[in-house]
Amino acid sequence: MKVTLADGLASKGILVVGLAFEQGKKASLVIESGDLALDTKPLLAMLKTMGATGKPDEVIKVPTAGFQLLVFTGLGKASRKYAHEVLRRCAGAATRSLAGNEAVAYSLPTSDLHSVAAIAEGAVLGSYLFEEFKGKTKGDQKSPVTSITIHTSFAKSPEAKSISSRAIIIGEYTSMVRDLVNTPPSHLHPVSFAETMKKAVAKAGGEKAGLKISILNEKQLKAQGFGGIIGVGQGSAVPPRLIHISYVPKKAKRKFALVGKGITFDTGGLNLKPGPGMEAMKSDMGGAAAICAATLAIAALKLPIAIHAWAPLAENMVSDTATRPGDIHTMYGGKTVEVLNPDAEGRLILADALVKACEEKDLDGIIDVATLTGAQVIALGTRTSAVMTNNDEISQQFLTAAQESGESFWPMPLPEDLRASLDSPVADLANIGEKMGGMLVAGLFLREFVPSQLPWIHLDIAGPAYNETGAFGYTPKGGTGIAMRSLIRFVENAAN
Ligand code: BES
Ligand code: MN
Ligand code: ZN
């Protein structure tokens, strides 16, 4: 991917400009081409005839004299200063609709450097394609947009270079998360996930970049007492793994641990999920993918914050060796859990990983990311993720970062009255409790595995990790990459 900021139009190729609408007695369209002056009168007349609305996700392409193609992308309501996420999305929607072309230029309204960055980011994120399993014969595979030029008067500013390189990094690692989520369980299992990460760490520069990876195999996991990961993975022909990626810069201002749920496929185990829709459970490793990719991106950005990322990986399958309802497993660190429902498996592998992650000394906080509960989707829908915490300050910092990165997260409580529902008559805890408020119960379960004085946030991304409806803005169908950008922004903010 190439991203260039330019203060003059370099070519007469494909140009993307914005289209907004003005409400009022006489509704009208507004062309928003940023610093580029266009002869708008005939264009507006044509757009009106075409029935253009300027609404978000409307992309209109017109062959006009002067350009190979002029593309209007919807901004929504006209404004003097467009929200960064509006810009990100309209740039992304345009790129998405231009797949198959190599180079695209954008001239959109930029009120400050942050809006330039948002456009670059959205344009890059919209270029994503997942074509790996489509016929290799000519015509079956589209080629992605690989050269993005942002036309802006800010092009000469000293920040221009870091804006393009950051957009490229965000794009590269969002693609990594999306690819991992989209890759089916026939091709992605705990062992191959771990191998992929090993290669990715080497490609990102390895120890020279401050990165290290270690992978615990099933023998080591068993010997060291990771009963949650072993218990969930024991029904699968492919053994579980625990990945640890560390990024330690020369001078670290702070240190955070990240933990991500890595169920490469969730059948529900002996509590088998219904067939229709089960294919979406290939996304059940979206948390693990997000924290691994975020760590590599943080290293690529050379941020002065140490990161310890832990990804427990297992496949939740049905077999004669699978965990039975009622089995008791001992989590890493010694707590016992009665597995009343083998479909509540995420919290078991996370319990192990959280306890392990908290062994690191002098942590400033710990964040876990998981496609944890169907209750999250019921409560907040498919596009808004949940934040639960034992510390309002770190939660607020994360919510600010999410807001800045354009990802939708919302705070949820951990009500004490629900905690008792996780009591078990035969073990320290049961893996399920009160059904109502299931997302919060899952959060309360995880809280048991984090020291109460360590700032912790739990992100439930069950719905937002995987887009089952249609593409929108810069978000494709399938894997979305959710949480990674907010994690990066959180760490960027912690460095400043
Ligand atoms: N991976 C699922 C949660 C999920 C649901 C993710 C929908 C993405 C979309 C998780 O392992 C699960 O099965 N949770 C159960 C928990 C219940 C048994 C307490 C659920 O939510 O039904
Ligand atoms: Mn499950
Ligand atoms: Zn699951």
Image (tube, grey):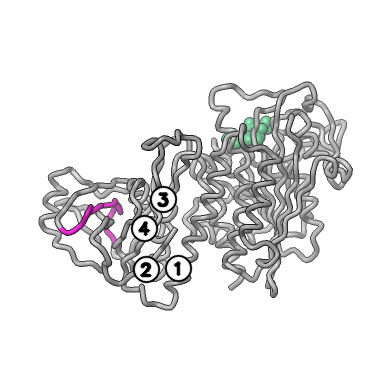
Q: Which one is nearer the viewer's eye here, 449 or 31?
A: 31
- Is 355 located above or below residue 3 in the figure? above
Query: What is the CA distance from the residue labelled 1 to the residue labelled 4?
Result: 15 Å
**Residue, disc 4:** 87
Q: Earlier in the sequence, mark 4 or mark 2?
A: 2
Q: Can you tell which of label 3 and label 4 is closer to the viewer? A: 3
**Residue, disc 3:** 127
Q: Which mark is residue 163?
A: 1
**Residue, disc 2:** 5
Q: Amino acid at mark 4?
A: Leu
Q: Earlier in the sequence, mark 1 or mark 3?
A: 3
Quadrant location of the C terminus in the rendered image = bottom right
- Is 413 located above or below residue 486 in the figure? above
The CB of the residue at mark 3 lies under 8 Å from ligand 1: no
Q: Which one is nearer the viewer's eye here, 134 or 85?
A: 134
Query: What is the CA distance from the residue labelled 3 to the residue labelled 2?
Result: 17 Å
Tell whether 400 sits left or right of 455: left
Q: Which one is nearer the viewer's eye here, 276 or 62?
A: 62
Give the class, few, some or many, for how many residues have Cα within 10 Å of label 4's Cα (few <14, many ≥20). many
Give the class, few, some or many, for how many residues have Cα within 10 Å of label 1's Cα (few <14, many ≥20). many
Query: What is the CA distance from the residue labelled 1 to the residue labelled 3?
Result: 17 Å
The percent coordinates of residue 78 (x first, y second) are 26, 58
Query: What is the CA distance from the residue labelled 4 to the residue labelled 2?
Result: 16 Å
Q: Are marks 2 and 1 in contact (CB under 8 Å)?
A: yes
Q: Earlier in the sequence, mark 1 or mark 4?
A: 4
Helix, strand or loop status at disc 4? helix
Q: Earlier in the sequence, mark 2 or mark 1?
A: 2
